[in-house]
Amino acid sequence: ARTRFGSDTMGDFAAGKMLKDVAPRGEIIEDDIKQCFTDIESALAAKAPDLLKALQDKGPASKDDACGLLPALAAVAWQMRDGGLVIHDHRLLSLKEIATIAVPEGFVAIGKDADDGLIMLDKSSGGVYELADGSQGRQVAESFGLFLEQFRDKLLSSKLEWANGTWAALS
């Protein structure tokens, strides 16, 4: 006799049911940031080779320079590549560019879109914000690590497509 596999014989995860009480994401550490960059660069080879080439041409920033301008975990990313990565529609800035952009006290600019809109890090909370029209704007992630992981996850699950120098969301 054949065994039938259906939702009545499958576990909750395999049947597509979501667990109610999932623990929140643990603390993001330096190795998580490095793994994100490894995963992103691997995906870019197939999805956006021109972006990968531009990113590889950037090279890393020095630890002293990165830590002098950015919170610790974000500094790890710049030690991998000194800007250039496009996350959604924002290009991460080089440390040289970051040093020249004026933002509200307690923030540091990390990226810019085609319309000169900024994404910034809150130096105290680590939150990532979009800056529109000179205001603080809205929070887009609780931390740079989460911001990077969320982008990486969308990229690896083929929810984004590289087109005309930016990422387009796929449904």
Image (tube, grey):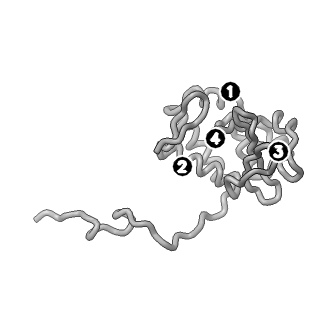
Q: Which residue is mark 3?
A: 134
What label sits on residue 153 in the rendered view?
A: 2
What distance separates the C-alpha of mark 2 from that of mark 1? 24 Å
Say which quadrant the N terminus sits in: bottom left
Could you tell whether 19 is left or right of 146 in the image? left
Label 1 crowd bin: few (<14), some (14–19), many (20+), radius 10 Å:
few
For label 3, the crowd category at 10 Å Cα-Cα, with few meaning under 14, some 14 to 19 and many 20 or more, is: few
Q: From mark 1 to mark 3, how far is it between C-alphas?
A: 32 Å
Alpha carbons under labels 4 and 2: distance apart: 12 Å
Q: Residue at x 68, y 38 (%)?
A: 90
Query: Residue sitting at 82 percent across and 44 percent down?
Result: 134
In the depicted view, which residue is nearer to us: 94 or 132?
132
- Residue 23, quarter of picture: bottom right
The dot on residue 57 is 1
Q: Does residue 64 lie above or below 2 as drawn?
A: above
**Do tag 3 and tag 2 residues touch (Cβ < 8 Å)?**
no
